[in-house]
Image: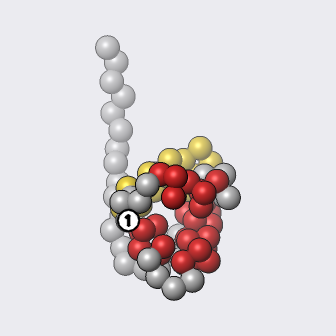
Amino acid sequence: MYHKKIKITTIDEVMDARDMKYKNNCFDLVIDKSTLDSFLCGEHSFINVAIYLKEVQRILKVGGIFIIISYGKPDNRLNHLVCFNI
């Protein structure tokens, strides 16, 4: 069986997830580990989630993968993603 070798590069930076300093379409994969949950617990939660998801959509390559690790029930999170066709 043929196995393709994949080079994985990770980036660990601190910045506002609603205003990321990356170029458009630059990531194949974005992983959210409770960032969405954190926004939903704060003031203006729906607005902040919309801004955040728009940024993720901007930096993710066409056909890229967005993985969300959340404590919330999927039914409570999916409505936010459907708005952006993510």
In front here: 40 or 25? Answer: 40
Q: Specify whether 7 is left or right of 27.
A: left
- Residue 3: quarter of image: top left
Residue 12 lies, in percent from the top left, at 33, 68
Q: Amino acid at mark 1?
A: Ser
Residue 37 lies, in percent from the top left, at 42, 68
Q: Residue at x 46, y 82 (%)?
A: 42
- At label 1, counting other C-alpha atoms closer than 10 Å, the crowd grade (few under 14, some 14-19, many 20 or more) is some
- Residue 78: quarter of image: bottom right
Q: Work out whether residue 23 can be spotted.
A: no
Residue farthest to the top?
1
Q: Residue at x 59, y 44 (%)?
A: 63
Q: Work out whether residue 52 can be spotted.
A: yes
Residue 26 lies, in percent from the top left, at 54, 58
- Residue 54: quarter of image: bottom right
Mark count: 1
Q: Specify whether 62 is left or right of 27.
A: right
Q: Residue at x 59, y 61 (%)?
A: 80
Q: How is the image coloured?
A: secondary structure
Is residue 11 placed above or below 8 in the rendered structure?
below
Looking at the rendered structure, the secondary structure element under dot 1 is loop
Q: Residue at x 32, y 14 (%)?
A: 1
Q: Specify whether 1 is left or right of 61.
A: left
Residue 17 lies, in percent from the top left, at 48, 74
Is residue 21 placed above or below 32 in the rendered structure?
below
Q: Specify whether 82 is left or right of 5.
A: right
The residue to which callout 1 is attached is 34
In front here: 8 or 82? Answer: 82
